[in-house]
């Protein structure tokens, strides 16, 4: 009897063992090692290193580049959800009211940029933004609005917005699809009943549709907020983080630290900070979501 | 019964929906215009691209640009590398995780519950944060700078989402099926391979397509884990375009178009799965 049990245990292990081992070797180990490295002064090359406690974390406070990066990431965090989730909701509502065949076609079209390569998309937009032959400035010139011409990727007042728009063009499709799916769950007779009671379109949307699709609104917000912090390719292609470090984001800084230098300990500390920020935002959002749910 | 008022209302509704359709088609055309601008510019000569405005059609379409891309870059081998990496990672990940999910979803024990949570925790770890320690681990495993290293990485990083989806799906399959198969004398492995795996096809297709596209499009991982000389992926090829053909837009755009074709094929062939998957919440933040 014991032998049979051992045999089933072994068979089970054959099923889950391989992926558990791979997953532990990389995904789990990398998280554990991140915390571990962040307390050392390891340069990634030598065999030995020493523990320096919180010294890396103290250095962070005095790192001007990181402060610029955090500031920019925070700007992305504010702008990106506004320019993706709201337009996505409006688009979804409009598409939901279209005739179904044309609506399906338009829906796929709006979704198409989401599956394109982020690097390629950014490169197309860099061409669109060019101040001389770029699409946007050419259009402005043609219409006669010469004064509105801006060096979209050179002018520090607009560059963060320009970069966010690149990411948003690609990022709008997913929330739009989620809203469309949510809109399909709104019961038709409820809307009809509201109409009979004399509600107009906006009232119907606010009082009937919005409460039903609210959970997906929250999910989209959460995804947009974390997505905003991870914007990388548009910065890489458009400004490369420059001029100087002025358009760096946290992720840009981490990647450049990983590539360019041997400060493994310090880069780990920054990674830990980034990890904490994302975790904090996610938990906060979860709290807000569950509170809304219990009301 | 319809009175005149009702008919007028229906007419008004129809008129309004026509107006909406028209408005949306125009909006849609504006929204995806960058794609058409790119197609247009890719067919110009280098001079035309700089001297003529973006909306002017090329004097003589330069389809040669597409061939020129293959001559001047390693696009062919990069395409092949990317496809091999995406497909292999997905196949390995799907096989291993679906087997694990079978045990996790079917065994009612504290251990399997714990195993499930063990996979789910990595949802909370952003890949960008741990990239530095992943890099050191790859060096430790002697996988840094090699294409198989990427497969190893994608298999591991795709596991959490796969386990989550597959477990949910297996739980929706009635348990009587297992018992019937065992009465018929099928072993666990036979049951998994001949009955469960075919049943899981829809969820596997959704996962494979969405994560496959993500792997194909990934830039950061190959950028950090491959060295020059170890072979490139398509995204790295585009990146090198961006720097070496920076002024030659027709050639750069042609390269981008070539790199995008595999994705478009998958998208149009499997749109249903992609959209179904998104609405099930298969989104990598």
Image (cartoon, coloured by chain):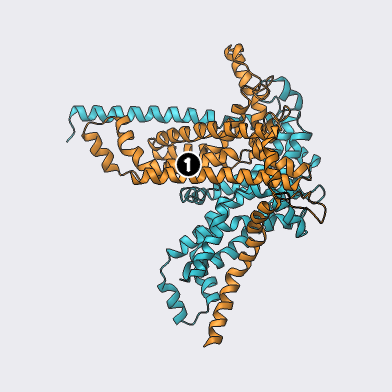
Rendered view: B131 above or below B88: above
Q: Is residue B29 left or right of residue B85?
A: left
Residue B30 makes an appearance in the image: yes
The percent coordinates of residue A78 (x first, y second) are 53, 32
Q: Colour of chain B?
A: cyan
At horizontal 70% and vertical 54% (from top left) the residue drawn is: B150
At horizontal 55% and vertical 38% (from top left) the residue drawn is: A171
Occupied quadrant, residue A254: top right
At horizontal 60% and vertical 55% (from top left) the residue drawn is: B158
The percent coordinates of residue A55 (x first, y second) are 71, 44
Q: Colour of chain A?
A: orange
Occupied quadrant, residue B42: top right
Q: Residues within 10 Å of mark 1 (few under 14, many from 20)?
A: many
Q: Quadrant of the N terminus of chain B?
A: top left
Rendered view: A264 above or below A72: below
The percent coordinates of residue B222 (x first, y second) are 72, 48
Query: Which residue lies under the disc numbered 1?
Result: A220
Chain of the residue on which disc 1 is drawn: A
In the structure shown, which secondary structural element does the residue marked by tag 1 occupy? helix
At horizontal 61% and vertical 23% (from top left) the residue drawn is: A158
Residue B55 makes an appearance in the image: no
Q: Is residue B206 left or right of residue B87?
A: left
Rendered view: B218 above or below B23: below
Rendered view: B8 above or below B90: above
Q: Quadrant of the C terminus of chain B?
A: top right
Q: Nearer the viewer, residue B153 or B88?
A: B153
Q: Is residue A265 left or right of residue B264?
A: right
The percent coordinates of residue B9 (x first, y second) are 25, 28
Q: How many marks?
A: 1
């Amino acid at each position: 009897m014991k032998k049979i049990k051992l045999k089933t245990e072994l068979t089970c292990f054959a099923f889950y063992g391989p992926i558990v081992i791979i997953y532990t070797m990389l995904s789990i180990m990398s998280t554990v090692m991140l915390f571990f490295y962040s307390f050392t002064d390891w340069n990634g090359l030598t065999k030995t290193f020493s523990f320096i406690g919180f010294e890396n974390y103290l250095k962070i406070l005095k790192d001007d580049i990181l402060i610029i990066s955090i500031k920019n990431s925070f700007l992305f965090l504010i702008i990106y959800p506004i320019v993706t989730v709201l337009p996505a909701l409006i688009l979804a509502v409009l598409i939901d009211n279209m005739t179904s065949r044309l609506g399906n076609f338009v829906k796929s079209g709006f979704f198409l940029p989401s599956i394109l390569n982020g690097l390629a998309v950014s490169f197309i937009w860099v061409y669109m933004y060019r101040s001389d032959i770029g699409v946007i400035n050419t259009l402005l010139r043609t219409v006669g609005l010469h004064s509105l011409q801006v060096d979209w990727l050179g002018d520090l007042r607009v560059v963060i917005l320009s970069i966010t728009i690149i990411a948003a063009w690609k990022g709008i499709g997913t929330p739009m699809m989620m809203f469309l799916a949510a809109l399909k769950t709104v019961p038709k007779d409820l809307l009809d009943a509201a109409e009979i009671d004399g509600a107009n379109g906006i009232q119907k949307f606010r009082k009937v549709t919005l409460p039903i699709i609210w959970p997906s609104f929250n999910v989209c917000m959460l995804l947009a907020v974390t997505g905003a912090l991870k914007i990388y390719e548009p910065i890489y292609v458009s400004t490369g983080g420059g001029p100087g470090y002025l358009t760096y984001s946290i992720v840009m800084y981490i990647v450049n630290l990983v590539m360019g230098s041997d400060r493994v300990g310090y880069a780990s500390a920054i990674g830990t900070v980034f990890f904490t920020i994302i975790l904090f935002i996610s938990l906060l959002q979860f709290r807000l979501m569950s509170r809304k749910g219990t009301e | 019964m319809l009175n005149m008022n009702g008919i007028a209302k229906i007419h008004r509704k129809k008129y309004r929906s026509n107006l909406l359709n028209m408005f949306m088609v125009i909006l849609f055309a504006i929204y995806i215009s960058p794609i058409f601008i790119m197609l247009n510019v890719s067919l110009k000569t280098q001079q035309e691209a700089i001297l003529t405005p973006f909306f002017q059609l090329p004097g003589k379409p330069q389809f040669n640009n597409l061939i020129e891309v293959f001559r001047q870059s390693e696009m062919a081998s990069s395409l092949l590398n990317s496809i091999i990496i995406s497909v292999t990672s997905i196949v390995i990940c799907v096989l291993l995780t679906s087997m694990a999910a079978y045990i996790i979803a079917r065994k009612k024990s504290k251990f399997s519950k714990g195993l499930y949570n063990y996979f789910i925790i990595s949802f909370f770890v952003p890949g960008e944060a741990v990239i530095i320690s992943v890099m050191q681990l790859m060096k430790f495993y002697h996988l840094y700078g090699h294409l198989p290293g990427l497969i190893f990485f994608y298999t591991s990083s795709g596991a959490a989402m796969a386990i989550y989806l597959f477990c949910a799906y297996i739980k929706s399959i009635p348990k009587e099926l297992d018992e019937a198969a065992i009465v018929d004398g099928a072993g666990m492995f036979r049951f998994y391979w001949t009955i469960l795996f075919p049943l899981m096809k829809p969820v596997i297709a959704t996962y494979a397509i969405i994560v496959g596209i993500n792997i194909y499009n990934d830039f950061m991982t190959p950028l950090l884990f491959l060295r020059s000389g170890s072979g490139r992926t398509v995204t790295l090829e585009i990146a090198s375009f961006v720097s070496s053909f920076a002024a030659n837009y027709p050639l750069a755009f042609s390269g981008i178009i070539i790199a995008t074709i595999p994705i478009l094929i998958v998208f149009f062939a499997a749109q249903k799965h992609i959209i179904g998957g998104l609405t099930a919440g298969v989104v990598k933040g």
